[in-house]
Image (spheres, coloured by chain):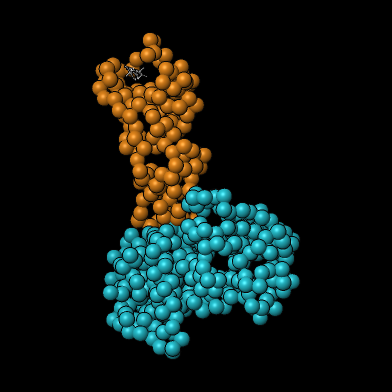
Amino acid sequence: MLKNRSVVSIEDVDSDDLNDLFDLSDSMLRTIEKGGSTDLLRNKIMATLFYEPSTRTRLSFESAMHRLGGSVITVSDVKTSSVAKGETLADTIRMASSYSDIIVIRHPLEGAARLASKFANRPVINAGDGSGQHPTQTILDLYTMRKETGSIDGKVVTMVGDLRYGRTIHSLIIALSKYDVKINLVSPQILRLPEYVYTKIGDRSRIKEYDDLSSVIADTDVLYVTRIQKERFTDQNEYQSVIGSYSVDGDLVSKMKKDAIIMHPLPRVDEIRPEVDELPQARYFKQAYYGVPVRMALIYRILGD
Amino acid sequence: MEKTLRISKIRDGTVIDHVPSGKGIRVIGILGVHEDVNYTVSLAIHVPSSKMGFKDVIKIENRFLDRNELDMISLIAPNATISIIKNYEISEKFQVELPSRLIGVLKCRNQNCITNTHEPVESEFEIVSKHPLVIRCVYCERTMGEKDIFS
Ligand SMILES: Nc1ncnc2c1ncn2[C@@H]1O[C@H](COP(=O)(O)OP(=O)(O)O)[C@@H](O)[C@H]1O
Ligand SMILES: [Zn+2]
């Protein structure tokens, strides 16, 4: 049961909650596709506090709240208005929770959303904390896998790119480890999955690490691609050589199963070539599209009757 | 039973017994014994013990331990016995207890953790595993092992 609860980490959402959210997302999606909105959350107010730039996540949260008939208040630039005055996050949250029914927060420091949930007397949704968690992205990723492949169980999921700092990856691996899946992790040595994520996974034997995609691409059902950021490398030559060997192009996709899918949390840069966009395996724009119905489902479960 | 005391009797103070052999130095570190120490500290390393094979024993004169120190000692010496000595006699004797949460006794090693800023919260860790020792920050969720905690 998610009613009145904060969602800071994907572990705050159990598997019954997830299945319920998937079904509810389906019906929210139907509502959107019929061109409609609802008034389920009329009179409810969401406060969005983004201490870090975001396009997709912020827009999809705000759109979701509007489609549920609620309203949104926001600070256009918390970083300059509040942080600059030296106000603590704890105080900003106390204030925001007295003006709203639910708080959505994105912050550059890990643990910020957990802290917010301790000072708010309203539910808090973590929209990303540093390289920590991003649970709504994870729910959306799982929903996309289920919707686009039929089921999550039984699949081979290959994750490629920055597995060290990519917060969407950490939550997703923790969530996937509760399903019957095989996980391949493909990354350069310096961007491997951090040990602390492994400590949250019961059965490590279902996860295998690889240096490149060639040996796993043919078996993959879901290819989850993330961006490798230039800033992570001290040696720019190394970056150039790495980026080449992890990018997804038409040639690579031709080696994939016909019914495999390619996902990406977006924004992408060079890691997926534009020619891939037209191929049937490409589902990353669909994935982004599902962001609104999934967040509608979550917000409704927390705030609805 | 030890027949002889390796370190002579103390009048008042604390004995930390049944510390795993070799970990005594870490206990000294927890107690914050530095160059400017103003009480007597004795450390016996690798003392034969009927229960443990070998153990370390620490005796400190005129000093008693607080909750945080006991919590920290329990992390590396979960079976340590604490004896409080008053006038050469043991006035109180108990075992340290590993708490389920460590609150305010340690800093999170993650530089990017919200608890390392000026927010009004104490650090907080849960115990993930005792052997080997692994604790997790309840804020940033990063884990720390014995090496991270005591370095
Ligand atoms: N007055 C004292 N001064 C210093 N150490 C003492 C004193 N009394 C007891 N001890 C030490 O405190 C520990 C606990 O004492 P005791 O309960 O007698 O031993 P044990 O736990 O081995 O049965 C032992 O290591 C013992 O040597
Ligand atoms: Zn931390």
Chain identifier for the cyan-coloured part of the image: A
Q: Residue at x 43, y 71 (%)?
A: A22
The quarter of the picture where residue A49 lies is bottom left
How far from the left and from the top, in percent, is residue B146? 49, 39
In this picture, is A93 found above or below B138? below
Q: Residue at x 39, y 50 (%)?
A: B123
Is residue A197 visible to the viewer in this orientation of the structure? yes
Q: Is residue B42 visible?
A: no
Q: Residue at x 34, y 35 (%)?
A: B97
The quadrant in which residue A86 appears is bottom left
The x and y percentages for residue A17 are 38, 65
Residue A206, percent across and down? 57, 53
Query: Relative to the observer, which residue lies in front, B126 or A85?
Result: B126
Chain letter, orange in picture: B
Please identify the residue farthest to the top as the structure is shown: B3
- Viewer-closest of B5 and A248: A248
Taking the image as shown, residue A277 lies to the left or right of residue A199, namely: right
- In this view, A213 is above or below A146: above
Residue reaching furthest to the bottom: A35
Q: How many numbered discs, if any?
A: 0
